[in-house]
């Protein structure tokens, strides 16, 4: 019974992550790839069938395979992520958010971009 409950919780977490990934594909301030990877991780613990569907998916499958095999991110996704982070940062500056918030955002964006850009280049 406990094992079944844990499986359901992991599957729900995977479904939530996948929903956020799909939303991130539409909204420039929400990342897609980390949520896809999170969904794959959660589905591996909760629903092998959902994980198989995700890893065999035409769009998401190659992202997951590159990350799991090499810790790699395709150059087009690196460019997209960094561009969207820059646009979000510029949007905050344009909206005149407080200096403290803007400073924290600059630090977080810089660290995230550095992490993304230092990953190996994946296929695609």
Image: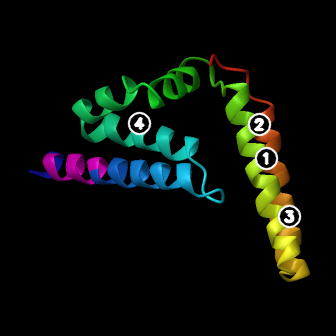
Instruction: Categorize mark 2 by other alpha carbons within 10 Å: few (<14), some (14-19), many (20+).
Output: some
Tag 3, which secondary structure? helix
Tell whether label 4 touches label 1 (CB within 8 Å).
no
Compute the Cα span from label 4 to label 3: 32 Å
Residue furthest front in the image: 26
At x 54%, y 28%, the residue is 63
Q: Which residue is mark 2?
A: 79
Of the image marks 2 and 3, the number of the one nearer the N terminus: 2
Circles 1 and 2, Cβ within 8 Å, touching? The answer is: yes
Q: Position of residue 27 (x, y in %)?
A: 59, 58
Is 26 or 60 nearer to us in this picture?
26
Magenta run includes residue 55? no
Which one is earlier in the sequence, the residue at label 1 or at label 4?
4
Circle 3 residue:
90
**Left or right, residue 13 beside residue 63:** left
Image spot of residue 58 (x, y percent): 42, 24
């Amino acid at each position: 019974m406990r094992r079944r409950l844990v499986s359901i919780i992991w599957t729900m977490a995977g479904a939530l992550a996948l929903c956020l990934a799909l939303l991130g594909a539409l909204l420039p301030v929400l990342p897609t790839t980390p949520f896809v990877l999170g969904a794959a991780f959660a589905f591996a613990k909760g629903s092998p069938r959902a994980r198989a569907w995700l890893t065999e998916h035409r769009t998401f499958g190659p992202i997951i395979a590159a990350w799991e095999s090499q810790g790699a991110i395709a150059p087009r996704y690196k460019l997209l992520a960094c561009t969207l982070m820059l646009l979000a940062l510029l949007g905050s500056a344009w909206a005149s958010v407080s200096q403290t918030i803007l400073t924290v955002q600059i630090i977080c964006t810089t660290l995230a971009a550095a992490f993304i850009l230092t990953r190996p280049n994946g296929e695609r």
